[in-house]
Image (tube, rainbow, N blue to C red):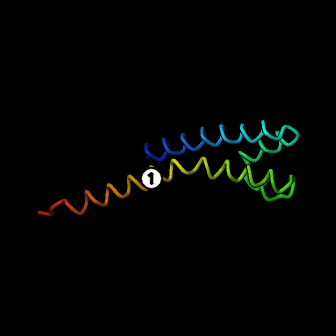
Amino acid sequence: MVSSSILISVYTKLLAKNIAAVASSYPQYSSLINSSASDSSIIFSGSYPDFVRDDVLKAFIGAINIPLIITASTVSISCLIILFVKIK
């Protein structure tokens, strides 16, 4: 449970940082881009051009990379530990 909340916190902070960077790149769409952080259905609603949508998607993908790498590493290490534990 604690690890999940830590990963969610990391994801949320990275997403906020990435979305802010995209919003500053496209000031005319900044309110819509900031809204997409809390409602991802906006991304595919057709409200903004494809090049903006692509950058917003990259922001989401960039935010999830680190939590996924941490999760995959933790699972891999756990599997290795399980292999070497002897059952009595």
**Residue 37 horizontal side relative to residue 48, left or right:** left
**Residue 48 left/right relative to 35:** right
Farthest residue toward the left? 88
In the rendered image, the vertical position of residue 18 relative to residue 87, given as above or below: above
Residue of label 1:
71
Question: Count the marks: how many?
Answer: 1
> Position of 83 compared to 3: left or right?
left
What amino acid is found at the position of numbered circle 1 in the picture? Thr
Closer to us: 47 or 4: 47
- The quadrant of the picture occupied by the C terminus is bottom left
Judged from the image, the secondary structure of the residue bearing numbered disc 1 is: helix
Residue drawn where x is 82% and y is 39% of the image: 30
Give how far across and how far down residue 78 sits, in percent. 32, 56
Location of residue 54 in the rendering, given as x and y in whole percent from the top left corner: 75, 54
Q: Position of residue 69 (x, y in %)?
A: 47, 52
Q: Quadrant of residue 87?
A: bottom left
Res. 21 image quadrant = top right
Q: Does 15 appear above or below 72?
A: above
Q: Is residue 50 left or right of residue 79?
A: right
Question: Residue 28 placed where, x, y %?
Answer: 88, 40
> Badge 1: few (under 14), some or many (20 or more) residues near its Cα, within 10 Å?
some
